[in-house]
Structure formats: structure tokens, C-alpha cells
Amino acid sequence: MNKFPNAFVIILSAILFAWILTFIIPKGNYQREFDTLNNRNNVVPNSYEQKEAPQLSAFNALLAIPKGIAGRADLITLILLLGGCFYLIEKTGALNQGLNQLITLLKGKELFALAIIILLFLTAGFTIGLQEEIIALTPILLLFGRTLGYNPSTIVTASYGSAVVGAAFSPLNPFGVVIAQKEAELALLSGTAYRSAFLLIAAVVWTLIILHYARRNRVEKAKLELDITGLTTRNKIILALLALTFAIVTFGLIVLNWGFIEMSACFFALGIGCGLMANFGFNKTTELYVDGFKEMVSASIIIGLANSISIILSEGFIVDTIVYGLFSPLNNIPPSISAVLMMVSQAILHFPIPSYSGQAILTMPILTPLADLIGLSRQVCVLAYQYGAITMDMIVPTNGALMAVLALAEIKYNHWIKFIIKPTLLILGVAAIAILIAVQIGYE
């Protein structure tokens, strides 16, 4: 019996398919104007036209692979340094000892513990759009899940899945709704009350889905090879440093507008500091850090390969054609139906454009005048974008973060799709209801 392709084969196949599409889909583009204020190119609405351009050669398609990896260098750096940091902390014994203490406190309250994980990642999703950072946390989360009797699918859904739902329904996600509102020329963070109401509804639905599945699919609890004596002073300091670093990083992301590079520096310092605190010395500390890198290499390469798909579609001049083909038919459809179909179109578009911030910058200047033309509020247009595009991060194989998390959790993609498709459709159902109500009440 043939094995289902692994994450690398799936993404390499998607790269090949993207290249083939450049020969099939007509080339074209929208005109763009440079925005000096924000230092980027903005799409000019109603400016799409087909163009003559040479075909993307096989060699140029091949070049997209190293370009894709190099283009995500900042994220790959974060994954490697964060992975090395957590591997080193795990080797100090502080993490396992801390988990033992936590498990002792939560004995008989496993569902409560799972609900806390869901709440934490929902919060991280709707506040800072947490996603790629979950990759390096996955091994620790899986270990914690096994000790509570939960399988990898439960833990990935409770962590990564919850962050996606939080980001999709967020009233303040800086990489999603804020960018979309800016592109739609809306007041930033406007319409917060309505979004918050459906964030709460989606969070409750999502939590109930996970808890229902978890209750019916328990596995034998794994036992940590540590006693349950109290934490040593040294390990308390290590865990305190970990908590402090997360607090600093969260503050930096929200207040100081930090990116991956600043986060990487913080976690690198944390890893080295914890190794020295554990009396490993410089040699052993750096050796363990490098061992941690090795654990994250496959996840890092997957991130880069996924980025290669977008590069091929862009250099093949077919991204704008796909956008034009998806949204042009909405002109002659009633507003309510058009709004839901706009969400569906955004969901489909997320396959070739797995960056939801990039998708907002590309599509909102096109959809905003379309929404004005058909009598649809711009806020509804933004809802359709954030619900359709971001929710699809749960399933699109072109999303490097998803594929990396699945690879670390040793979940085959076909198994994941069978598991996650119903919960995703339920959440999209909640989103569709939110959009229909928004149209009816004249949400502005």
C-alpha cells in the first residue's frame, strides 16, 4: 500500500502545479501606485488588463525555491532560535519538572486544562495574530498534551487552530483586520463591538467542538521520567526567565511594533541564559542549542518552500488574473449573496496567496469600489476578507506554518483534512451568519 505524500512532497507538488498554471491562466495585472506614506505599492481599482510576457522557464521556477527560503529568512531565523531555545530549556529539566507540577495540580481536571490552552491561543490569535511562532512551541505542547491524555490532533487544534479562529474573528488583529480597514479607507478598529460579539460566539463554538472531540478521543497518558518533588530554585529561576521573556516579547509586539528579528534576539538570549543557569557551561549550552536547530530544520524548509509558490505565481503574472476572475462576477449579484460569495472567493484565493496580510493589500483596493457599486458596506467587505482568508489557514497546504506544525506533530495531511474539515465548515457557517446579519442591519 502506497504511503500518503509527506509535507515536502505535497508542497513540491504544489510548486510544480503553480508553474504549470502559469502556462494555462492568461497573464495580466492591475496597475499599481507607490504609496510614499506606507512605503508600498497599492493596487489601482478597475485597472486590470491582460499583458504579453515571456513564459516562466523551468530554471526560473527552480530558482523560486531558494528565493522562497531566502525571502522568509527572518521567520526561519525565529523558528531556529526559538526551537534551539526550547530544546535547551527542556534539557535543563525545568520544563518537565514544571509540567509535572502543573499536571499534579490539574489531576482530574484535564478538560479544564485543555480549555485554558484553547483560551490562551484564541487570545494570542485575536491580539497579535500568533501563528508561525506556534511551530517552535509545538513539541512542548505535544508533550503536555500526552501527559493529559490528548492525541496530537487535539493539541494542534487547541493551539494552532484556536489561534487561527482568534485571528479570523479578531476586531484588532494588526496583520488582518487593521490592514484591511486601512486599505478600505475605514477608521482603524472601527466596528469593534460587532466583531467582538461574533468573536465570542466563534470562540464558544470552537471550544465546544474541541472539548467534545477530546472527551471522546482520549489516549493513554504519557508519564514524564521525573519525580513530582517541588521545583528547585534553579528551575524556578529558569521558568521565571521564560515567563519574563514572553512578557517582554508580547509587550514588544503590541507596543513597540516588533517583528521576527527582535523576537529572535530575545529567545536567543533566553536560551543561552537558561543553559548557563543550569551550569551547562558555554560549550554544552551551544552544543545543545545547535541540537535544537536540527529539530527545526524541516519545519524551516517547509516555510520557505511554501513561499516559493507565491513567487512562481507572481513572476508568472497570474495572481492578478486569479483575483480578477474570482471577484468580477460579483457585480450583478444581490448584496447579501454577493457578501457571502466574497467570503468564499477570499477563501479560494488563500490557496495561491497564503499570506493573509498580503491578501488584504492585494484584494481590498479592488473590492472596496466593487462594494460601493453594489451597495455593500466596506465593513462587510472587510468581514468577508478576514473570515474567508484567515480561516483557511486551517487547511491550505500552501501555508508553511500549518504544514510545519503537522510535520512536527507527525500528522499526515490527509488525516488532518478529514479531521478538521467539519470544524472549519462550522466556523465558516458562523462567519456566513455574521456577514448576512451585518448586511441586513446595515453594519458600517
Image (spheres, grey):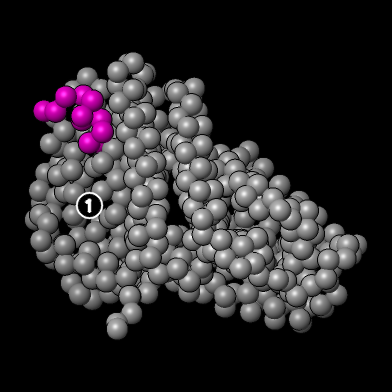
- Left or right for 266, reference 65: right
* Front-lying residue, 87 or 61: 87
Magenta region, main secondary structure: helix
The kind of residue on which mark 1 rests is Val
Residue at coordinates 67% horizontally, 75% vertically from top-left? 289
Question: Magenta stretch?
Answer: 332-342
Residue under circle 1? Answer: 319
Q: Is residue 377 above or below residue 276?
A: above
Residue 177 sits in quarter: top left
Residue 42 sits in quarter: top left
Residue 9 horizontal/vertical position (percent): 33, 75
- Left or right for 194, reference 89: left
Task: Determine the residue located farthest toward the front in the rendered image.
Answer: 216
Dot 1 falls on a residue whose secondary structure is helix
Residue at coordinates 11% horizontally, 44% vertically from top-left? 49
Residue at coordinates 77% horizontally, 63% vertically from top-left? 100
Residue 282 sits in quarter: bottom right
